[in-house]
Amino acid sequence: MFGSSGNVSKEEAARTAAIAGAIDVLVTLSALIAAHSSVLLADFLKTSLEFVAVLLSWLAIRRIVGGSNHQFDYGIGKLENLSSLLVGSIMLLGMLVIVVNAIANILNPSHIQGIGVWISLVAQIVFGVINSTLSWRSFRTARAENSPLLKSQAQLFFTRAFGNVFILLALGFSLLLSGFSWSVYIDPAASLVIAASILISAIGVLSSSFYDLLDRTLEEADQIVILRELAQRFHDYEALHGIRSRRAGGQVFVEVFLEFDPDKTMGEIQTVADALCRSIEAQIPSSRVAVALAKEALH
């Protein structure tokens, strides 16, 4: 069953991520201005693009929470998936920027220098911890809410934490090995590794979102759950007139059309319907079940 508390928890997670991302952008910009380093330029561009992705996610979730009057359930699922597509597309854009910058610096290599390098070293440690925490929280909430938007956010923060580790190592080795001529290639090489990690995550986000955007029937296992529950409760209703189901994004919608004994009171019918809905929803993650009176039962 979908509730406002779930959407609120999504908004809180996205807002925290957006605030952390904005601070990260300011820190990486300060480090870039105060240093000459290709990997810091890549870090700033990557962080800025990722912040835009997180901001889009937050705005989408705010729209969901603001419109969560249960009148647009299918549309909300689509909005989450479209936002995930935007996140994945921005990740691809960030990857391309890093690759182009890395190639340029391989062709024209130079040693890193400036106080910004030390600023970045500290920032990578701090934001590595922050991004790892946000990734874990987003994955946990995504599993609980079955949200493709939060899943893409979790993947995004995982790649950011991965990037923090690699940038930290790249800067550290560049400083420690500056006496060797080949050390000038450490920066662009690390950038290419980061770009590869972003590409892998972006492909996963985009493929998942495209698949979830397609409305489709339920898997056979879920259909069996519904039929089993109806069979176990056959004595509570007169006839089954149809089942309508669809999966929209990470959400499942099921409508069951039943005919009841005309002697049953509305209270008795409601009790049966509520029990059936609760049982099915408990077995099918992120499902919303409704029982309707069949037209034949209304005559």
Image: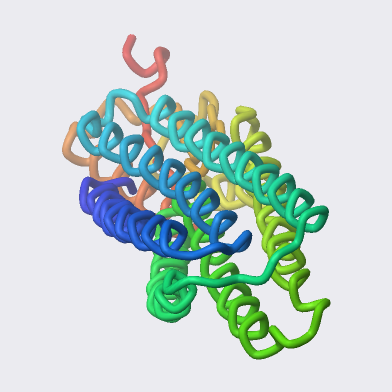
Q: Could you say where residue 218 lies in the image, as x and y percent from the top left? A: 63, 40
Q: Which residue is drawn at 65% across and 44% down?
A: 97
> Quick one: 55 or 278, which is closer to the camera?
55
Q: Looking at the image, is 206 positioned above or below residue 21?
A: above
In this rendering, the count of numbered labels is 0
Q: Looking at the image, is 161 positioned above or below residue 169?
A: above
Q: Looking at the image, is 79 positioned above or below residue 163?
A: above
Q: Could you say where residue 215 lies in the image, as x and y percent from the top left? A: 61, 28
Position of residue 96 in the picture relative to residue 122 (left or right): right
Position of residue 268 in the picture relative to residue 106 (left or right): left
Position of residue 109 in the picture relative to residue 140 (left or right): right
Q: Can residue 285 be seen in this view?
A: no
Q: Could you say where residue 216 lies in the image, as x and y percent from the top left? A: 64, 31
> Quick one: 293 or 44, which is closer to the camera?
44
Q: Quadrant of residue 159?
A: bottom right
Q: Residue at x 22, y 46 (%)?
A: 4
Q: Is residue 11 visible?
A: yes
> Quick one: 45 or 146, which is closer to the camera?
45
Question: Which color mode does the image show?
Answer: rainbow
Q: In which quarter of the image is the C terminus?
A: top left
Q: Could you say where residue 278 lies in the image, as x and y percent from the top left? A: 35, 52
Q: Looking at the image, is 73 positioned above or below residue 184?
A: above
